[in-house]
Image (cartoon, rainbow, N blue to C red):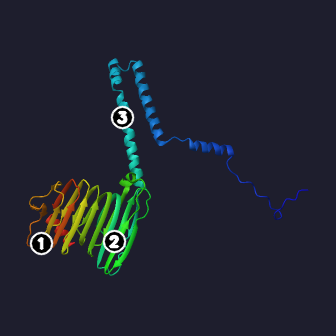
Amino acid sequence: MSTQPRGPAGARPPAPPVGPPVELTSIWQSHQNTRMHPLAKRIALLSSGFCLVIGLFLLGYNLEFISEQAMNTALNLWPLLLVLAGFMLVVDSARKSVSASSSRMASQEFPLPLEAGSMELALHVQFSYGKLLAETAPTAPRLVTETIEPRPAPAIRSEMVGNRSDISISVNQPFFPSRLKAGNTWRLQLPRDIPLRLSLQLHEADMRLDLRELAVEALDIRADSGTQEVLLGLPREKLNGQIYCSGSNLCLILPARVFARVHLLNPFCRVDFPQGDLERREDGSLITPRSGDNRGSVEIEVDGPIRSLVLDVEDTDDAQDVGET
């Protein structure tokens, strides 16, 4: 006699779970695995269109709707169909790659720990494989990173030295840097109401520093490649800078109404500068003529095997607008 356990009186045993048969499930999984790749779909669509066009053309020729001369012309120009197909595939692939890159772009914000009561900020940055931007912070100072693929967060260290805050920012090197260079951007948003000392070390990176609204007192840049652009602002008293660049181009925009001296240590570098705003001295340095409304001074030393240096002085109207803001 069977001794199976029974539930409460009048209760029925639970029904087995209802689901698709094993055969239907396996057929559905095989259908999912054998779906065509989007590129294969586009190629199949183009091939079908070509077959349709060629078939209609040959049918019209057999029915004498198309003349012999038109047939000969078509036989000479048929490679244009291949050119058109290749162009359509290239445009479609480029459009999809751009949309995929923009959709994968991830942005992160890291606040810069500026200690309360700091009278000065010294910032040390080590950056590689990408683009570094610096600008005035709209609110609190921070670092904004924009990357296509996930990357480790930058290491930010801060310490107080007297009344000065020292902040250092660095990141580990990626395994495949050339592949990720185009999708790596750092934006340094710096405070405007505190004296700054910037020290930047760049490796295989482009740079654009907009320092026109910042109180920079010292600037030290080491860049081994890429293109660099630095826009300097009016100093409170004096701005000292050292730039060592091994890249192709360096663009340096000097503020108006200041006495500026740019000393170029590489005599083989090609220099482009406005003749009326800068004068070349015998020692190879370039200076701005002194005037009665000079506001501080700027001294920059440029060294390294740089190919081209572009020097310019900001327009007086633009400089006045920046100073008033």
**From mark 2 to mark 3, how far is it between C-alphas?**
52 Å
**From mark 3 to mark 1, how far is it between C-alphas?**
63 Å
Q: Which residue is mark 1?
A: 294
Residue 212 is left or right of residue 96, and the answer is left
Residue type at numbered disc 1: Asn
Residue type at numbered disc 3: Leu
Residue type at numbered disc 2: Pro
Query: Which marked residue is nearer to the observer: mark 2 or mark 3?
Result: 2
User: In this rendering, is residue 281 above or below 111?
Assistant: above
Q: Tell me, for residue 84, which label it has, or none.
A: 3
User: In this rendering, is residue 180 above or below 166?
Assistant: above
Binning the other alpha carbons within 10 Å of mark 1 as few (below 14), some (14 to 19) or many (20 upward) gives some
Q: Tell me, for residue 141, which label it has, or none.
A: 2
Residue 47 on image: x %, y %:
44, 32
Q: Is the C terminus in the top left, top right, bottom left or bottom right quadrant?
A: bottom left
Q: Secondary structure at mark 2?
A: loop
- Residue contact between numbered discs 2 and 1, judged by CB atoms under 8 Å: no
Residue 174 is left or right of residue 286, and the answer is right
Which residue is more in the foreground, 131 or 213? 131
Q: Is the N terminus in the top left, top right, bottom left or bottom right quadrant?
A: bottom right
